Image (tube, coloured by chain):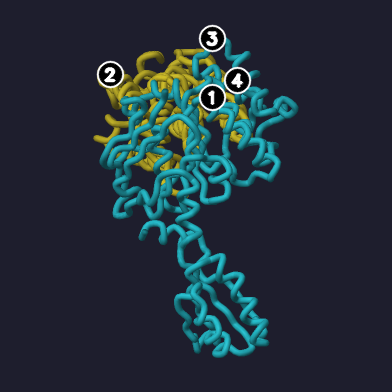
Chain colours: A cyan, B yellow
Amino acid sequence: MAVITIDKVSRWFGNVVAVNDVTMTIGPGITGLLGPNGAGKSTLIHMMSGFLAPSSGSVTLDGAAIWRNQEVYRQIGLVPERESMYDYLTGWEFVLANAELHGLADPGAAAQRAIALVEMEYAQDRQTGTYSKGMKQRVKMASALVHDPAVLLLDEPFNGMDPRQRLHLMELLRRFGADGRTVLFSSHILEEVEQLARHIEVVVAGRHAASGDFREIRRLMTDRPHRYLVRSSDDRRLAAALIADGSTAGIELDWTEKALRIQAINFQGFTTLLPKVAREAGIRLYTVSPADESLESVFSYLVSS
Amino acid sequence: MNTTVARLTARGLFGRRRVLVLLAVPVLLLVIALVAGNSDQDPLDLAHSVLGTLALGTLVPILGLITGTGVIATEIDDGSIVYLLSKPLPRWQIITTKLAVAIGATWLLAAVPTYLAGLIVYGSADNVALGYAVATLASGAAYSALFLLLGVVTRHAVIAGLAYALIWESLVGNYVKGAKTLSVQQWGLSLAHTVAGEGMVTAPVALSVAVPLLILVSLAATALAAVKLAGLTLSGEE
């Protein structure tokens, strides 16, 4: 069992706090690290992979500190976000070099196994510099898996992948999770995370916002109050008709925007109510747009709850 | 020494376009030596300007800069160093291997051509060519170690190294008396003085000072580079 423990960890760069007093435990199975860009996901992964020292607190793997401890890499496989990877090597040479650097007994066999695992045999004799983003990602995976690690850390692994490559990588990660390995990946896309991870850790603005089962977090995210911006042929009449219904919490006439700002309590209820009310009253809807669907607002709601 | 690290480093160093710059240095030196050798100036004066000023004073530091930073700074810059560092390899081993590659390249591309240039300009008489070749061997190794360290500690290694090579070594080290004691180039010259025949090469720094300083600086730079590499931090947020 390989368990990464992050205990009261903060990390600041000068005056900027990137990670603020985070405590979490990453155990076997797949864990998704979810958060908007700049939330501190990479900082956390850098600390878990030994490339950044925590400013305070401790990051350990099975009790052993990760920072300045190269022995942890016998257990950790790392898939970094950056793409550069000795462009002048072929895929095969790159994975083989990684196997050799691990000091494996039979690096050739290990490299072959890892390349087969990510199904990259067909391109293994091409230089990695000629690879597409998805292919690079897979070869990076192979290099991380070459020593059969108990822990796999992936920083934004689905970035730039096409849907087929995405499915393939998800399948691969699922298999690792099922094997009882500890798999942690970061992403800023909720759908990605919930397709793959049972367990989700949410970070927002350097803080640990939520932790738990993906269903629980999904519910928190969809049940929050939604805001909409609506323009119609008769805003006042529409407002009057809407406020009578229980799924609407508040309506404001915005004079500068010439629109209604509506706060809905119940997402499902409101989305069926609005067109129905408009049709019955003979009002034409010109604009219906969610006002705060950005991930940041979803996340900030999570933090406040 | 780790053969995989050495292989990756050598391919990175001699691959791409850098190899052209690297090769330009010895070619330039040999062409100048050939041209100078055919002129009717005093051969010893020529030897001092071609081997001393040009080779030891300018080309060796520049080559040391390109190889010393080239073996590690490029990888740190583009982030591919993670693949070396996320392995259970002692950090000093990565540094010494990369240093060996850098020194090997500097010797091959600077010390050997310097010796050849010496033979062209002055012949093998009085060990002048040999003396300068030994000087470039020693200074080349020290430069490689220094610039490798620079490559680990700063993202602006090439600029910092260039400033050091041009301002300190070429300008201050040549014209300010006290500074000569602390110049890699002058330490090399001290070796040339010792190897070459009596009175052939003048060196302001005594051998008993130069050799310990050469060794000390090279070892300290290497050790510090290993420590710094072990604590290498990847940039935080994207």
Q: Is mark 1 on a helix, strand or loop?
A: loop
Q: Distance between the residues labelled 3 and 1?
A: 23 Å
Quarter holding residue A64? top left
Q: Residue at x 55, y 77 (%)?
A: A229
Q: Which residue lies furthest to the top in this view?
A: A105
Tag 2 secondary structure: helix
Residue beneath disc 2: B212
Q: Which amino acid is tagged 3?
A: Ala
Up-down relation of residue B177 to residue A33 (above or below): above
Label number found at residue A96:
4
Q: Where is residue A208 in the image (x, y as percent from the top left)?
A: 36, 49
CA gap, disc 2 and disc 4: 41 Å
Amino acid type at circle 2 is Pro
Foreground: disc 3 or disc 1:
1
Q: Which chain carries label 3?
A: A
Q: Residue tagged by mark 1?
A: A179
Q: Classify mark 4: helix, strand or loop.
A: helix
Q: Which sits earlier in the primary sequence, circle 3 or circle 1?
A: 3
- The answer to whether tags 1 and 4 share a subunit is yes
Name the N-terminal-most of marks 3 and 4. 4
Image position, residue A96 (x, y; %): 60, 20
Residue B132 visible here: no
Labels 3 and 1 within one chain: yes
Instruction: List the residue tagged with mark 3.
Output: A105
Is mark 1 in CB contact (under 8 Å) with mark 4?
no
Mark 2 — on which chain does it sit?
A: B
In 3D space, how far apart are the residues under numbered discs 3 and 4 (Cα atoms)?
12 Å
Question: Residue at 46% across / 43% down in the picture?
Answer: A213
**Residue A290: x %, y % from top left:** 55, 70
